[in-house]
Image (tube, rainbow, N blue to C red):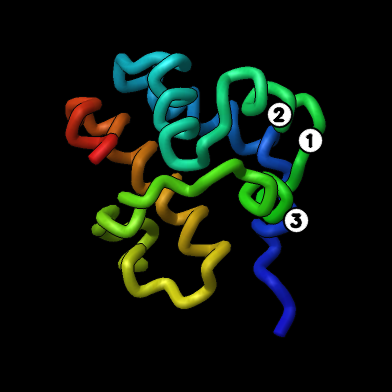
Amino acid sequence: MAGHRIFTMAFSSVYPLYVQKAERKGRSQNEVDQVIRWLTGYDQAGLEAKIRQNSDFETFFAQAPAIHPNAALIKGVVCGVRVEDVQDPLMQKIRYLDKLIDELAKGKAMEKILR
């Protein structure tokens, strides 16, 4: 079965949308970066390098140093899909990230977002 088209989309093309969503709700780019680093294990330099390299989502997550062990605690609905029920591991990681950005934009405390 062919992968979803988001898998080959450049992370760098979606990253500014994450930042815009957060900033519209009074959050900062630093907070977006913190959430991404928590989930993926990238340090700031590694995250910035992936953005500069135009890595696609598949590569971005495949080369992530370590998905946070508490990522499985991320629950809820993104785009009408329950993240804990997503079967494809890559799509689930993408949905985890979407859910974390949603929580950030909704004003949830960082301590709660970063489980």
Tag of residue 30: none
For the question of whether residue 57 can be seen, the reply is yes
Residue under pointer 3: 8
Residue at the outermost bottom position:
1
Q: Quadrant of the C terminus?
A: top left
User: How many other residues sit within 10 Å of disc 3, few (<14), some (14-19) or many (≥20)?
Assistant: few
Say whether residue 98 is visible: no
At label 2, the amino acid type is Ile
Residue 33: x %, y % from top left: 48, 24
The residue pinned by badge 2 equals 51
* Inter-mark Cα distance, 1 to 2: 5 Å
* Quarter where residue 11 is shown: top right
Residue drawn at x 47%, y 63% as measured from the top left: 92
Position above or below: 59 against 46: below
Query: Are discs 1 and 2 less than 8 Å apart at CB?
Result: yes
Residue type, numbered disc 1: Asn
Q: CA distance from mark 3 to mark 2?
A: 14 Å
Q: Residue drawn 32% across and 59% down?
A: 72
Quadrant of the snapshot with the N terminus:
bottom right
Residue at x-position 39% and y-position 20%: 31
Is the residue marked by circle 2 packed among few (<14), some (14-19), or many (20+) residues within 10 Å? some
Place of residue 27 in the rendered image (x, y in percent of width and height, measured from the top left): 33, 17
Badge 1 vs badge 3, beta-carbon distance below 8 Å: no
| Residue at image location 48% in from the left, 34% down from the top | 36
Provide the residue designation for mark 1: 54
| Mark 3 vs 2, N-terminal side | 3
* x, y percent for residue 100: 35, 41
Q: Amino acid at mark 3?
A: Thr
**Mark 3 falls on what kind of element?**
helix
In this rendering, position of residue 111 left or right of residue 80:
left
